[in-house]
Structures are given as C-alpha cells and as structure tokens.
Image (spheres, rainbow, N blue to C red):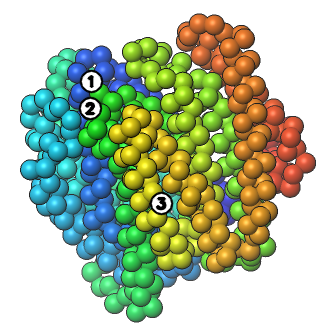
Amino acid sequence: MGRIEKSSKNIKYTVIAYGVNYFFKFLVRFIFVKLLPIEYLGINGLFTNLLGILSLAELGIGPAIVYSLYQPLATKDVATIKSLMLLFKKAYIAIGVITIVVGICLLPWLDWFIKGNNISYIHWFYVIFLLNTGISYFYSYKRSLLIADQKQYINSIYQSGGQILLAILQISSLIVCPNYWIYIILMLCSTFAENFIVGKKVEKLYPYLQDEKVEILDSNIKETIIKNIKAIIVHKIGMMAIFSTSNLILSKFIGLTAVAFYSNYYMVITAVNNFTGQFFSSITASIGELIVLETNEKKVKIFNVMEFTVAWQALIVSSGFYVLLNPLIELWLGKEFLFDTYIVDLLIVNFYLMYMRKAVNTFKDASGLYWNDRYKPLAEATINLVASVYLTIHYGVIGVIWGGIISTLLTGFWVEPYVLFRNSIEIKLKDYFKDYFKYAAVTLLTSVVSKWLYTKLFTEVTIINFVLGVVLCLVVTNAVWVLVFRKREEMVYLRNIARDKFGMKFL
C-alpha cells in the first residue's frame, strides 16, 4: 500500500471517528451547562490549562522518538524499533509518575489561580483531573508506534470509541443524577480503560514488542534523540505558555465565569480546527517517509500542494466562523453565552494565523528540525504571556486573544517557514509569502461576501437558517476558490488524485 493510500485510509477513518466523537462532546457540554453551575464549566477549562503545563514533564521525548521511528519503520529494522520502544516505555512510566507527584505539590497554590473561588471540594476535583492526566502516560506511548507506522486510523477508532462511550455514560449520569463527582470519575475510568485496550491492540499487531531480548540502542540514534529532546523541551515550554495559559489568565484576573464563556468558543474552534487538522495528523508519518526517501523536487511539490490545501481549508472554516460562530453558540447554549462581535472577529483572525502554520509545521516536524528554531518558542511564549496579561488586565477577555495574534505575527509567522526552507526543502521565502497573502486576501473578501449574503437572506437565528447558512458558506467559499485557482498546478494535482484514487471521474 502506497503513501497516498495509507494517508487516505487514515484520513477517512480518523475524520469519521472524530466527527462522531465531537458530536457527543457538544451534546455533553449542552447538558452540562443546563444541569450544573457554570463555575464547574470554568473548572474544566482551568484544570485543562493547568495540567497542560504539567505536560512539560514529557520533555519532548515522544516527538523525538517518533521521529526516530520513521527510518527503521521504512526499512523494517525490527531490532531498532524494539530498542526505541523499550526506551519509550521506561521514559513514559517515569513521566507519568513525575506528573502526578509534581501535580500534587501544586495543590497548596491552587486557590491562587482562581479569582473569588467558592467551589467546595475543588482540590479533590483537581486530584482526579491530575490522575487522569498522569495515568494516560503509562500505556499511551504505544499509540506513537501506530501513528509513526501510518496506522493512525486504528488509534482514532479506539480513541473515539472510548470517548463516545464516555459521553453516553456522562450524559446518562447528568440526567439521572447531575453530580460533578460522577462526571469526572467516569472520565478517569474511561482514560484508564481506553489506554489499556489500545496497549493490548498494539502488542497484538507488533508481537515482537513483548520479546525480552532487546539490543542496546545505537549510539548515533541515541545522540540524535537527546539533541532533539533538548530542542523540543524549549518548544514544549513555548507551546505551554501559548496554549495553556489563556484560561489561567482569565481565571486569575477576571474569574471562572469568563473562563466558561471563553472555553465554549474555544471548544468550537478547537473542534473544527482539530477536525480539519485530522488530515495532517493522518499524513505526518507519510511525510516523514517522504522526507527520508524522496528528492527535493518531490518534497517541494508535495509541500506546495499541502500549503494550498491548508489555505483552502482555512478559507472554508474562517468564513464559516465569521458568518455562523455566534449563531451556533446561541443555538447551542443560548444568547446569555455570547461574546461581542469584535471579540469573535479577533478569535477568527487568531485561528486563521494559527491554522495557516499547519503545512510548514508538519514538514518541519517530519524533517526533525526541532533544534534549528529552538529559540522561537521561548520568544513567542514570552511575547504572548506579557501581552496577554497586560492587555487582559486593561481590556478584559480580548487581551488574551490579542496576545496570541501579536506573538504569532512577531515569531512563528515568519521564523517557521524560514527554518524549513533553509534546512529541509528549497523554496524561496518571498514565493511562500506571495502565495500566503494571495490566499489571505481571497479568504477575507470571500468571508465578507458570505456574511453580507447571509444577513440579507436570514434575519433570525433558527436551526433551519443555520443549516442553510452552512450550505451557503460551503457553496460560496468552494466556488470562489475553484474559480480563482482552477489553473494552478496544485489544483490540477488534487483533481487528478480525486479522479484516479477516489473514482471521482466527473472532475
């Protein structure tokens, strides 16, 4: 089975499983806000961010070893795979223990993160969230072998199956007995069961992992892993400061209610972002193999196609958010949960800037360029943290959004493509940005036109009007994109793939 076939299989299974999974997540959130106090929703967002900081204990070991697996998997070097996985196992068991111990040490300072805390048993709630995070490391390292071996679809099926079962149990418990204790204990049990079952599946697929005879890892591979870990530590710190501090800042300076409001929007944006992003997680291993085996000309061609695809997706999603994000929140949770339009618009700008980094970062990670931009995450994190805190204190919720936009424009926006094109694939930076701004201009104009059409056609927020709005956005965005870029080489390539690999002869 070739790379395209493996990637398409991963995408198909992953997207379907993810879509069903998030349908149940939104349903759980809807019932949650109707039956439990809104402060409990704020607790979910706060603890998710706080425990995201503890993921620093992972220290980049996972990505470094996954990158090291691409070569032996491509060449079927079983001895090296066994050695890497044994190292992975020992490291992740230690990480799980460290995460739990460090997390417990944070207990005395928990109240510092919450303005006006009046939640009983909040420390015990935190312990359950902490255990849920810690135990995931004990088995989850085996997932990485599936992903590196281009079998992401297997992981997706088991992961989504576990999450769907959890959602059903949580919904049932909330309806029968709306109790937050039951809600989070079910989460803990589900995490343990899912990781255990996935671990057994991996052992069945790769029986040699149970072989006790394991060779000492090659010193050159070990040196590469150590070097990458050092760089990824910096990346982890940076990403933690960017993605795991928004709710902490809001909780500290505004309160748990603001966290609850923000987390609702963030959940929608993250769901759509990750849903479309399944495309990239499903092909990362294939890109890793491409980097190892193919010529620069082939790499450049595939990168251009991926960047084109990212921009197409960003157009569809950003335009959809611009038109329908507030109507969705109103239909889902009610008008009382709405942000002002200017806050939502900035959320969409921040989303677009982050989403447009996907192609570059996918290739950069597959190329193992962790060391080459090791200072960028620290600069990005520092700018983000300082700007977010200052602007949140003076301007409220919008401050954390501006912090993300400012830090992205000053760092990742240009540093990441510069590092990739200088060290892995040969593309001129000016050519990259020429296409980038062309894609952004089309996105902006299409979004404005889509919203104008929507407001002219629909005056009320109803489910029927929302569905028609989705159809309108899909038709307008895709029609404009195809019309503007119909003759581009990337469009021709995608059309040929659709015709030859997926039987879409009408294209």
Image quadrant where one finds the N terminus:
bottom right
Disc 2 is placed on an element classified as helix
Counting residues from the start of the chain, the first of labels 1 and 3 encountered is 1
- Amino acid type, callout 3: Glu
Location of residue 16 with respect to 294 vertically, above or below: above
Counting every numbered tag in the picture gives 3
- The Cα–Cα distance between marks 3 and 2, rounded to whole angstroms, is 26 Å
**Residue 331 drawn above or below residue 220:** above
Q: Callout 2 environment at 10 Å: few (<14), some (14 to 19), or many (20+)?
A: many
Q: Horizontally, is 372 left or right of 124 in the view? A: right
Say what amino acid the circle numbered 1 marks.
Answer: Ile
Residue for badge 3? 380
The residue that mark 2 highlights is 256
Outermost residue toward the front in this view: 394
How far is the residue under mark 1 from the one under mark 3? 32 Å
Mark 1 = which residue?
38
Q: Provide residue 170's location: percent of width, then percent of height.
A: 26, 28
The mark that comes first in sequence, 3 or 2, is 2
